[in-house]
């Protein structure tokens, strides 16, 4: 045996005796340094007397002494030595990698990341740990095994693979894992210590002097992995697990998500056959979508198709469409998606399992802690702990926002199955009703923070995540899909009062957020609820709101006119001057969209008069400000300035609240725009600046964009082209939402004009093409006229066809 073998024997017997190097030195009279050198193989030929002293100090038997002495002799092993137990740790054929899986698809970025980690590990002076985690069926083992086959040659002492069987009823214990790894290091059972602690110490000592890739597949938890980690220069331990193993000090993490649509179809084609997918590409994409991008589900679907050559892909897709049998369809031999989910589910504690089942009742794509607490019936603290356990088990994913969780489509189907199997119909209905009512109550409270005429927003039964205007904005945006779904359910169930209360509360908030489709649905439902309740006043109010959404947000002025007539009739019938004034205020907006400026001014003057007669200053000054803008557009600038000054003075006299500040910002913007068109840009610019500062103070992004747009237009008119470019481009980026398509058309037009003035005709043409494309998204007479003009400038005859090069 070589000198390294002697050192290994020395370390093995010392550890078996539970002695430190210092204790052995004291017992034998040999220095600690010498013992250390011998264990590390730095002493080439230990003296016979040294070997005898060590043997005596270690308490070796006569056979062990003979082997120890043989190991201490310099030279090669004799043929007789080959039958003796070898403690040197030469890697054997146990713990070898499984075959490489060819179905690994769409994980190139993850493989590249693992290659980087391996390079870093080999050059490191400490053991590196990488964890691959993800939901059941995501392909964690496939990634780890494929990566190991690629990387094993980078590690001097080879690669070891161990299945920790973390999903079995009896996972591999750390001690049994150590024993298997000792055998993989080449140790004969006869020299493996009987004491578990000694075995662990020996394993760590053997790993310490080696550079290996150690793959620990299918880990159950941190306690199973932690004992297998040790100091080892240049070693990479690659762990795969359904759990995130957050308790480990992990250098690198890879969380496997679903495959992209293209990669999912690619995997399906790899298993089912390229010719099958090529023949039905759209149906293949449908199957991939219904499998949720989970590799296991895609492989099963591919195997079903490969074994049923008479099936068109559309047949399998149709079967998968039925949620109630989707998991049953995703079965091929002993491969089952349901079984993969069940393994993780049965490892949950009762609270987490109950939470998982109840999340099937959540209508939207993600969930907050508060909503989860309501639907599960758990206190918030317990609910958050349950959600974290589900996330650690990869049964929930992390949403893009803090404190929110997502559930994969197939896992949601599985959760619904478990709910039907384990829950009562009565409990489920109670949870649904409780959740629906809570969502509507919180939505109403949140929306009322934007009401200029209300100070009391009321209380909510249950978790209350809304406490001011900012939290209200966050909640309404984050939970929009949930409260919108609850509104639909309430409308379908005839809960007219709840529907009407929500629609009424949303009036002022709708000015700031949401698209036309949302608000047409909300206010349309509100109008129908009011009609069902026989509340003509409320019907007039909801028709006013719907009229605004149709004309301003959806570009449907003719439909808005029909709703306007309903609003006027109902308001007149109940004798409500404020509602009648609002009706004419919104009618003036319709007239503007229909390019009827004189009619717009006439109807708005009537609105101002009615608001003043009713003693309602909020409506009076809003309509007066809008009238000032309309007069500006008709060229009556002097009266427009007078009205704007009155509005600015009014809002400056109000208490500084977010709502009043935003109204002041709006009238300041209109005032500055009129000043600029009067030729007084120097007076206009400070007013623009004040308006923008107020909008920024309250995070009103659209308001900031509107100021920048109007300022950019004013600078363009004054030929301050560089400043105008910055303002217009910034405004365009901020108005990315389609609800502001009308503004985006105007900005694109102005940018095309600007680049003409800068003698850059190529960019000017590009912006005209974008403006023409944008016009098709917002159908109004004004936009049709703009599209006709742009088409003429571009030399395009038809504007109802896609423009070549547009986009």
Image (cartoon, grey):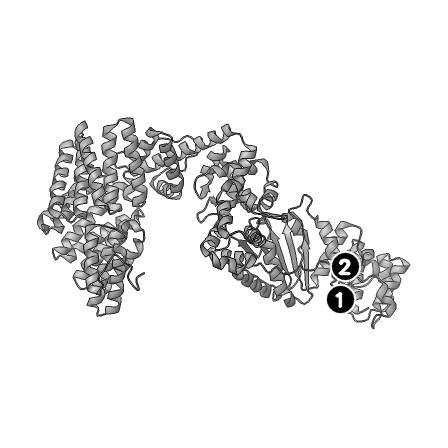
| Residue assigned mark 1 | 37
Q: Residues within 10 Å of mark 1 (few under 14, many from 20)?
A: some
Q: Quadrant of the N terminus?
A: bottom right
Q: CA distance from mark 2 to mark 1?
A: 11 Å
Label number found at residue 789:
none
Question: Which residue occupies the extreme right position in the image?
Answer: 62
Q: Nearer the viewer, residue 241 or 403?
A: 241
Across and down, in percent, residue 572 comes to 16, 30
Quadrant of the snapshot with the C terminus: bottom left
Name the residue carrying label 2: 21
Q: Earlier in the sequence, mark 2 or mark 1?
A: 2
Q: Quadrant of residue 744?
A: bottom left
Secondary element type, mark 2: helix
Q: For the residue labelled by badge 1, is the local secondary structure a helix, a strand or a loop?
A: helix
Residue at the limit of the structure toward the bottom, as seen here: 75
Between 11 and 431, the residue placed more toward the observer is 431
> On the image, which quarter does residue 49 sit in?
bottom right
Q: Is residue 65 visible?
A: yes
In this view of the protein, can residue 455 be seen by the observer? no
- Residue depicted at x 45% and y 41%: 368
**Badge 2 vs badge 1, beta-carbon distance below 8 Å:** no
84 sits left or right of 22 in the view: right
How far across and down, in percent of the image, does residue 387 sit?
A: 52, 41
């Amino acid at each position: 045996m070589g000198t390294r073998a002697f050192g290994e024997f020395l370390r093995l017997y010392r550890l078996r005796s539970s002695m430190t190097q210092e204790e052995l030195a004291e017992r034998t009279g040999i220095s600690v340094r010498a013992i250390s050198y011998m264990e590390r193989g730095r002493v080439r030929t230990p003296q016979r007397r040294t070997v005898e002293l060590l043997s005596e100090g270690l308490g070796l038997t006569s056979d062990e002494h003979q082997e120890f002495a043989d190991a201490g002799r310099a030279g090669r092993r004799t043929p007789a030595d080959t039958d003796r137990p070898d403690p040197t740790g030469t890697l054997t054929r146990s713990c070898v990698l499984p075959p490489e899986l060819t179905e690994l698809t769409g994980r190139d970025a993850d493989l590249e990341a693992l290659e980087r980690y391996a390079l870093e590990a080999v050059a490191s002076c400490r053991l590196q740990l990488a964890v691959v985690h993800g939901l059941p069926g995501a392909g964690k083992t496939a990634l780890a095994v494929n990566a190991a086959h690629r990387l094993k040659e980078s590690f001097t002492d080879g690669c070891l693979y161990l299945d920790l069987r973390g999903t079995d009823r009896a996972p591999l214990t750390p001690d049994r894992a150590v024993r298997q790894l000792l055998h993989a290091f080449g140790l004969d059972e006869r020299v493996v210590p009987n004491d578990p602690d000694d075995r662990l110490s020996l394993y760590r000592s053997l790993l310490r002097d080696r550079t290996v890739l150690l793959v620990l597949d299918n880990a159950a938890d941190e306690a199973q992995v932690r004992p297998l980690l040790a100091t080892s220069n240049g070693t990479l331990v690659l762990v795969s697990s359904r759990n995130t193993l957050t308790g480990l000090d992990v250098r690198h993490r890879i969380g496997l998500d679903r495959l992209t649509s293209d990669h999912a179809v690619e995997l399906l084609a790899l298993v089912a056959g390229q010719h099958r997918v090529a023949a039905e590409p759209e149906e293949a994409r449908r199957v991939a979508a219904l499998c949720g991008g989970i590799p296991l589900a895609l492989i099963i679907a591919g195997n079903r198709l490969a074994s049923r050559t008479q099936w068109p892909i559309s047949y399998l897709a149709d079967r998968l469409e039925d949620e109630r049998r989707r998991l049953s369809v995703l079965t091929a031999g002993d491969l089952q998606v349901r079984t993969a989910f069940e393994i993780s589910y049965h490892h949950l504690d009762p609270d987490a399992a109950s939470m998982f089942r109840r999340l099937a009742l959540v209508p939207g794509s993600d969930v907050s802690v508060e909503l989860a607490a309501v639907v599960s019936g758990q206190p918030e603290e317990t609910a958050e702990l349950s959600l974290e356990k589900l996330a650690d088990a990869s049964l929930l994913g992390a949403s893009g926002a803090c404190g929110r969780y997502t559930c994969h489509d197939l896992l949601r189907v599985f959760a619904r199955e478990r709910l039907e199997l384990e829950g009562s119909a009565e409990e489920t209905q109670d949870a649904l009703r409780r959740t629906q009512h809570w969502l509507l109550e919180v939505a109403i409270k949140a929306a009322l923070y934007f009401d200029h005429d209300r100070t009391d927003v009321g209380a909510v039964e249950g978790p209350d995540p809304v406490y001011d205007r900012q939290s209200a904005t966050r909640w309404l945006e984050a939970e929009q899909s949930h409260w919108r779904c609850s509104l639909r359910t309430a409308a379908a169930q005839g809960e007219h009062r709840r529907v009407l209360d929500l629609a009424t509360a949303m009036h002022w908030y709708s000015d700031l957020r949401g698209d036309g489709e949302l608000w047409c649905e909300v206010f349309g439902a509100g109008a129908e609820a009011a009609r069902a309740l026989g509340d003509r006043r409320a019907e007039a109010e909801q028709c006013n709101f719907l009229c605004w959404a149709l004309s301003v947000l959806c570009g449907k002025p003719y439909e808005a006119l029909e709703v306007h007539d309903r609003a006027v009739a109902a308001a007149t019938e109940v004798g409500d001057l404020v509602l009648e004034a609002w009706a004419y205020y919104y009618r003036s907006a319709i007239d503007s969209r229909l390019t009827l400026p004189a009619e717009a001014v006439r109807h708005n003057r009537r609105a101002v008069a009615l608001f003043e007669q009713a003693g309602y200053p909020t409506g009076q000054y809003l309509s007066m400000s809008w009238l000032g803008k309309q007069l500006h557009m008709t060229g009556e600038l002097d009266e427009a300035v007078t009205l704007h000054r009155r509005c600015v003075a009014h809002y400056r006299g109000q208490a500084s609240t977010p709502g009043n500040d935003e109204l002041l910002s709006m009238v300041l913007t209109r005032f500055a725009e009129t000043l600029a068109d009067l030729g007084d840009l120097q007076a206009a610019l400070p007013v623009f600046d004040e308006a923008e500062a107020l909008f920024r103070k309250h995070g009103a992004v659209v308001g900031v964009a509107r100021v920048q747009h109007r300022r950019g237009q004013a600078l363009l008119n004054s030929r301050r082209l560089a400043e105008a470019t910055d303002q217009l481009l910034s405004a365009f980026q901020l108005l990315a939402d389609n609800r502001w398509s009308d503004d985006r058309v105007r900005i694109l037009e102005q940018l095309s004009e600007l680049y003409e003035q800068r003698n850059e005709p190529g960019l000017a043409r590009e912006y005209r093409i974008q403006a023409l494309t944008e016009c098709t998204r917002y159908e109004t007479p004004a936009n049709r006229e703009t599209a006709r003009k742009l088409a003429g400038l571009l030399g395009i005859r038809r504007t109802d066809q896609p423009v070549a090069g547009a986009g």
